[in-house]
Amino acid sequence: MKLSGSQILIECLRKENVKVVFAYPGGVNLPIFDVLYDEKEIEVILCRHEQGGTHMAEGYARVTGRPGVVLVTSGPGATNTVTAIADAYMDSTPLVVLTGQVPTQSIGNDAFQEADVVGITRPCTKYNILVKDVNDLAKAVKEAFYIATSGRPGPVLVDLPKDVVLAKTEFKYPDKVYIRSYSPNYKGNKWQIKQAAESIMKARRPVIYAGGGVLASGASQELLDLAEGMQVPVTQTLMGLGGFPGTHPLSLGMLGMHGTYWANMSIHHSDLIIAVGSRFDDRVTGRVADFAPGAKIIHIDIDPTSIHKVIKADIPIVGDVKVILSGLNQILKFSENGQSGKNQAWLSQISDWRKEHPLAYDQGDKIIKPQYVIERIYEATRGKAIVSTDVGQHQMWVAQYYKFDRPRTFPNSGGLGTMGYGLPAAIGAQKAFPDDLVFCVAGDGSIVMNIQEMATAVSYNLPVKIAVINNKYLGMVRQWQELFYDRRYSSSYLGDGPDFVKLAEAFGAVGLRAKEIGEVDQVLQEALAVKGPVMMDFQVDEEENCYPMVPAGAAIHEMVFSDPEEAEPKKQGEKEQKKADGVLTA
Ligand SMILES: Cc1ncc(C[n+]2csc(CCOP(=O)(O)OP(=O)(O)O)c2C)c(N)n1
C-alpha cells in the first residue's frame, strides 16, 4: 500500500521510537499535523515559539540521551529554530529538526514563507538535507537519526517541501545506514591506550578534566572506577557536571572562568591532564599559552577534529569515552596502583588549596544573596532535582553551589550561552521525566526571552519550578562593567518589573515572592507543595558578583576573589604562583 510523505514521516518516527514531538504548525506542514491528529503513540507538544520548542527538544535530549524531535513550518518557523539549533550544535545535543518547505517547484522563487533553511543552518548542524523526492524520505529520516545520535551527537535538519509530504509511495524503512566518509571510531587505538595507562601510573600530580562527552557516552561509572582506582581527582566542565558525583571527595567541582580555586590550581600545577570528552573551551583554558605548563596531556574524544585544536595532546585517543575508559581500567591494576599512595602528597596539596579559598559569600541577615537561594534550593530538593538554568551569574552560581551527583541532571547552555534556554529546556526535561522534580533557575533578564513558554507549561500542566534570581540587572554584564568598564553600567540595568508574581498568574501559574532571607525557605516549601508550574521571584542583592573569576585573557590560576581592586590579573597570578610553587617544592 502506498503512503503519503506525511504518513511515511510518522511511520519513520514510530520506528525510531519517538514518543514526543515539540511542534508548531503552518501552511506547508499541515499535512503532517493532519496525520498526527490520529496518532496515538506520538505526543505533540505545542510550543509557543519555535525557539522555545527547539530548546524543549534540547532539554528532553539532555536528560534522556535520546534525540529531541522538532517539527516546524517553513520560513519564519524554520528560522526561529536557528538559535536553538546552534546551541545544540555547540553542546553536542542530538536533535532531529523537521522543517516544512515551500513546494519544490517554488523553491528559489521567493515564495511566501520561503527561507533557504538548509543554507542558513549548514554551519550549525551536524548534517542537513532538503528532501526533493518522496522516495528518498524514509532513508533521509533514518540517516538523520543515525547521524544525530552517533559519534559526537548533534542537530540534524531535514527540510520537507509540501509536495513531497503530499506525494505517495511505498514505505520501506532501511535496516541499516551506510554513509561513505562517515564512520565514527569507537574503539580507540590500543597502543595509545596503553601509553595513557603508563602515564597515569607514573604521574604524581594527575588530574582528570571531564567534559560533556562523559555524559554523552554514558561513561560515568567507568570514570568513577578510574578516579577511585587510581586516586585521581576529577574536575569538570560546565557541560560535564553530574558526570562525576559532585559530593565525592575526589571531585574538585568546575574549572575555568568561574571554576573553583583548587580546580584551577590543580590544573595549573598538574603533571598529567587526562582530558575526557572535553574540548578545551576558552572558558576552561583561559590564556592558552599558559595553560597547564608542566602537564603531559592525554586527550580522549570521539571527535577527531577536537584533538590538537586548542591544546596539543601528547597522547591523543580518538574513540568513545566509555569504551576507552573501560579499556584503560582493565590495563591499570587498581589494587596495586591505587593503594600505593603515590598521589597522596598531591591530594593533600589540593585539600590545602580547598581550605585556602573556599567558595564563599557573605549572607548577612536581611538582603538575600543569590548564592544563598541556590544553596537553599539544593537543600530543599536534597540535591535530587533536575536543574536547568539560563545564562549569566545565576548559571555560574548553580554550577558552583548545586552539587550534581547524577548524570543528565543539569541541562544548560554551555557553548553558545543562550539566554532564554532555561524555561523551555526545563519543560522538555519535565516532559521526559514527569515524576521528577524539575527546577529552572533563571535571571530576570534571561527568563523574559522565552517567557511565552509559561503558557506551554501551564497548558500541559508540567510542574516546573522556576526560580528567578532577580537582581534587577543583566548581572553578568553588570559584573564585567564593574570590573573592566569603570562601573559604567551601559544598558545593563533592567529595573523593576515585570512583576513576576502577576506574570505567573497571568499565564495561569502560581507566583510567589521572597524579599528577605527569612522568606526563602518558606517560598520554596510553598512552591514544592504546588502540583503545577510555579514562578518564584527571589529579590536578591543587586550588586553581588560571581567569584572566583578568571578575567578574560588571564591564565586560569590568575583568579580574582572578591575585591575589584584585585582584578589586575598579572599581580594576583604572580602572587598565587609563588605561593603555590613554595608549597609544592616544600
Ligand atoms: C541571547 C543572548 N543575548 C545576550 C547575551 C549576553 N549575556 C550574557 S549573560 C547576560 C546577562 C544575563 O542577565 P540575567 O538573565 O538577568 O542573569 P544574571 O547574570 O543577572 O544572573 C547577557 C546579556 C546572551 N548570553 N544571550
Image (cartoon, rainbow, N blue to C red):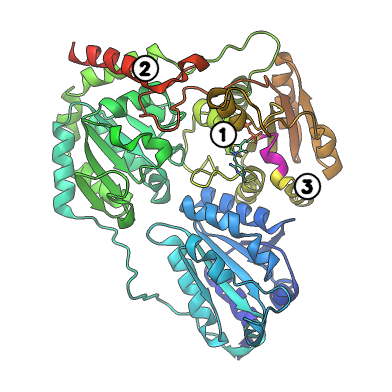
Query: What residue would you read off at disc 1?
Result: 395
Question: Can residue 483 be seen from the camera position used here?
Answer: yes
Q: In terms of depth relative to the viewer, which is nearer, 96 or 531? A: 96
Task: Note whether 37 is above or below 413 in the view shown.
Answer: below
- Residue range (magenta): 443-448
Q: Residues within 10 Å of mark 3 (few under 14, many from 20)?
A: some
Q: Which residue corresponds to the image point at 66% horizontal and 48% vertical from the top-left?
A: 424
Task: Note whether 9 is above or below 91 in the view shown.
Answer: below
Which of the 4 quarters of the picture holds residue 267?
A: top left
Q: Marks 2 and 1, how far apart in space?
A: 28 Å
Say whether disc 1 or disc 3 marks the residue closer to the N-terminus: 1
Query: What residue would you read off at disc 3?
Result: 458
Residue 77, image x, y percentages: 69, 65
CB atoms at circles 2 and 1 under 8 Å apart? no
Examine the structure image and report whether residue 379 is included in the region drawn in magenta: no
Closer to the eye: label 1 or 3? 1
Say whether disc 3 or disc 2 marks the residue closer to the N-terminus: 3
Give the secondary structure at mark 2.
Answer: helix
Question: For the residue marked with disc 3, what is the amino acid?
Answer: Val
Q: Residues within 10 Å of mark 2 (few under 14, many from 20)?
A: few
| Disc number placed over residue 325 in the picture, else none | none
Quarter of the image for the C terminus: give it: top left
| Left or right: 365, with 195 as reference point | right
Question: Can residue 224 be seen from the camera position used here?
Answer: no
Q: Quadrant of ligand 1?
A: top right
Which of the 4 quarters of the picture holds residue 376?
A: top right
Query: What residue would you read off at disc 2?
Result: 571
| Left or right: 572, with 369 as reference point | left
Mark 1: C-beta under 8 Å from nearest atom of ligand 1: yes
Give the secondary structure at mark 3.
Answer: helix
Q: In terms of depth relative to the viewer, which is nearer, 554 or 505? A: 554
Q: Residues within 10 Å of mark 1 (few under 14, many from 20)?
A: many
